[in-house]
Structures are given as C-alpha cells and as structure tokens.
Amino acid sequence: MAPPFQRHVFVCTNRRPDGHPKGCCATKGAEEVRAAFKSEMEKRGIKGQMRANAAGCIDTCAMGVSVVIYPEGIWYGGVKTEDVPTIVDEHLLGGKPVERLMMPFMKKGPKPEPGK
Ligand code: FES
C-alpha cells in the first residue's frame, strides 16, 4: 500500500556533539529503536500500511528517545527497544495507546480544542 499510511511513527534520531547540555536521542539508542519498529512491523506483515521514519529533534530531548505516532498525535518518551513490541501490538495494531510510555504532558487528559 502506498501512502497515506494508517499510522506513521516518527523516531527522533537527532545526534548532538558529546557533552552538549541538551543531550540527544541518538546517544540513548534512537537508531536501535527505529530499527526495532521496522523489524516488528515487518514481522507482523504491516510494513507498507504503517511506517517508521527517522525524525530530527522534536524538542523533547530530556525525555528521549522521543517517538510520535500519527494520526493520533501520541508522544512517547524514554522509549527503549524492549518497549517497541508493546507499542506495535497495543497502539499500532490494537489502536490503544500505551499510557505508561507516554510523555507526562500527554497524561493530563484530552487536549483543549483550538481557540478554547
Ligand atoms: S534530540 Fe531527540 S527530541 Fe531533541
């Protein structure tokens, strides 16, 4: 299946120089996390329907590895390779985001509608 994908996973793989005060997702295993998404998608036969792409910094560096999934707009933080099968099964396939892995600002309830 060609785009648009049912779900689109963006993994921040930004790399900063060693010692940079902001740190970066690359040194926390971002490439491995992205590879795990691709591998788990392939195993489940959903490659082509869903996609995992590398992204630049999405400004949540302290909470990396940062992952955002659309169309829901769910932000996950501190994602490790061992979390990926759970995200794939529960969120990508099951449609139920994994609350324990969401960034703290995602857990404050539904987002206000624009203009409210
Ligand atoms: S380096 Fe990954 S969110 Fe900034």
Image (cartoon, rainbow, N blue to C red):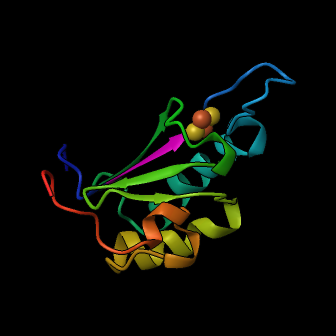
Picture quadrant where residue 15 is located: top right
**In this rendering, position of residue 12 left or right of residue 16:** left
**In this rendering, position of residue 58 left or right of residue 48:** right
**In this rendering, position of residue 65 left or right of residue 43:** right
For image coordinates 15% across by 52% down, the residue present is: 114
Q: Which quarter of the image is occupied by the C terminus?
A: bottom left
For image coordinates 50% across by 66% down, the residue present is: 43
Check the image and name the residue furthest to the top.
17
As for residue 113 lying within the magenta part, the answer is: no
Q: Position of residue 19 (x, y in %)?
A: 87, 24
Picture quadrant where residue 36 is located: bottom right
Q: Position of residue 85 (x, y in %)?
A: 57, 71
Check the image and name the residue furthest to the left.
115
* In the rendered image, the vertical position of residue 34 relative to residue 43, given as above or below: above
Picture quadrant where residue 14 is located: top right
Check the image and name the residue furthest to the right.
19
Residue span colored magenta: 8-12
Q: Nearer the viewer, residue 98 or 31?
A: 98
For image coordinates 31% across by 77% down, the residue present is: 95
Q: Name the magenta segment's main secondary structure.
A: strand
Marker count (numbered):
0
Ligand 1 shows up in the quarter that is top right
Q: Position of residue 107 (x, y in %)?
A: 46, 72
